[in-house]
Amino acid sequence: MHLLVESQGDAAGRAAALGPHLAIISRPGLFARLEPRLRPLGVPIVYWAHDLHFVRLGLQARFHSRLAAGAPQAMRLVEAQCFTRADLAVLPTSDETVRARVEFPGARVVATPYFAMPDQPLPAGPPVGERIVFVGGEHHGPNRDGVEWFLDAVWPGIRDRSPQAELVVVGRWHRARPWPSGVHYSGVIAEAELDALLRSARVGIAPLRFGAGMKRKTLHYLSHGLPVVGTGFAVEGLETDESGSVAGVLLAETVREWESAIGSLADPDLWMRLSRSGHHYVQEAFSMQAFRHGLASVLSEANRVSD
Amino acid sequence: MDRSTALVINHPSVIFDVQGDEAVIIDLTTGRYFRLDPPSTALWLRFAIPSSPESVLESCRTPGALRPHLDDIVADLIGRGLLRVPDGTESAPNGAAPSEPWEFRGFALEEFTDLEDILGLDPIHEVDPEKGWPHAAPG
């Protein structure tokens, strides 16, 4: 398997020179640019979709007027090209797969888990302190909106109730941004440092008010046995039980629900229950074995449909 | 440019769709997209198949209104990379190439740049050719 990056130039030429048996292209813009140039190779071409971007943009437009009204329509046009021209399109969630089949008739779309989370030890108990963690950069619209909303609407109440509470924001953000009291910006940190940070935290947050697709940050928190407080968008594509709950996650939408959910994790019994159930779920559903099995199925299907 | 030179929509770099009678055009190389109102869409569609500006003028019911603007419009579309000279590989995108006479009622191209990040290079995770994707950058 060879990985080609478009920014290094002439991706199509370099791909052709490799004599591939199959090409997988991720990202809608890249697919739309590259697919016509790879088609003459006569190999199956798979669109590895991150999510349905036009759905995300449609939701984003509700909160941000700076996004032009035509953006979702334009994005849908590009994605229609990707889904319908690919020999096989892949999405990480079943819900989006169904939606894509409806939106783009004739497209062959399958779902498979995208994430293989490394095994992490289960915490022996809640950590000392009231550290909250957010992982994600501001260049992704839902992250920027979510953190800004959280800091504006939820954080003051958290600090009023627990002056010792601290929030660590990990990822690429403008360092000069005026972070409120109690908020620490770590920047981008190495994997080992991030693992240690997640083990030291009491809760991982995902205050996403819009979005699409499965959220790696949620799985990342859960893989460390770190309970999550998040919106419905934070758990898209994850398995729910009969009550609509996701293992290891407390769902919260309103400010009051956010304050209540974060406050409730001071209870060590609840914390341990969520920690264990989330950790177990990710180990079972998002193991390397599950990922490999899904990938093998995709490759087999891609070869089958192109015959 | 000579008005007799055929021009065509710059497919596959440029794709478009018409909903109702308004067009959305996307330049996949820049991530910029454009909206055209119905009168502008009517002119745009003339170039869905290779057409010279002269032939576009001939198909227009109101050539007197179009003639003073046509060169500027065509030059603008070429300058933005939305039209090009045919290279023999063209097919009519969306099968949308009207042949009936049409009426020139103005042309306005509205440009948007808010999808450049998404349609450009990977906006979320940085990919390392050696380490694969995803991976965390060193601190």
Image: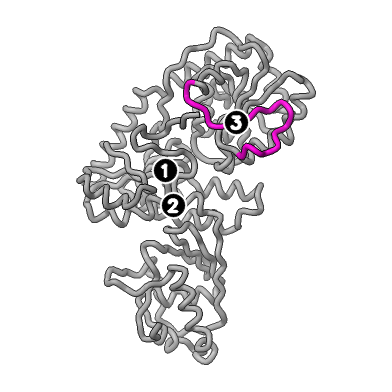
Residue A202 occupies which quadrant of the picture? top right
Q: How far, Cα to Cα, is label 1 from label 3?
A: 22 Å
Q: Chain letter of disc 1?
A: A
Is residue B129 found left or right of A260 in the rendered image? Answer: left
For mark 1, give the secondary structure.
loop
Color scheme of the displayed model:
one colour
Tag 1 residue: A49
Q: Residue furthest top?
A: A124
Q: Position of residue B76 (x, y in %)?
A: 49, 74
Look at 61% across and 12% down and name the residue there: A127
Is residue B9 found left or right of A179 in the rendered image? Answer: left
Tag 2 residue: A79
Three-letter amino acid code at the position of disc 2: Glu
Is residue B116 found left or right of A15 in the rendered image? Answer: right
Q: Chain letter of disc 3?
A: A
- Residue A154's place in the image compared with A289, above or below, is below
Q: Front-most of B42 and A217? A: A217
Which disc is residue A206 wearing?
3
- Residue A57's place in the image compared with A111, above or below, is below
Region rendered in magenta: A174-192
Look at 55% across and 24% down and name the residue there: A246
Q: Position of residue B37 (x, y in %)?
A: 56, 71
Q: Residues within 10 Å of mark 2 (few under 14, many from 20)?
A: many
Q: Where is residue B14 in the image (x, y as percent from the top left)?
A: 41, 63
Look at 66% across and 39% down and name the residue there: A176
Q: How far, Cα to Cα, is label 2 from label 3?
A: 26 Å
Q: Do labels 2 and 3 share a chain?
A: yes
For mark 3, give the secondary structure.
strand
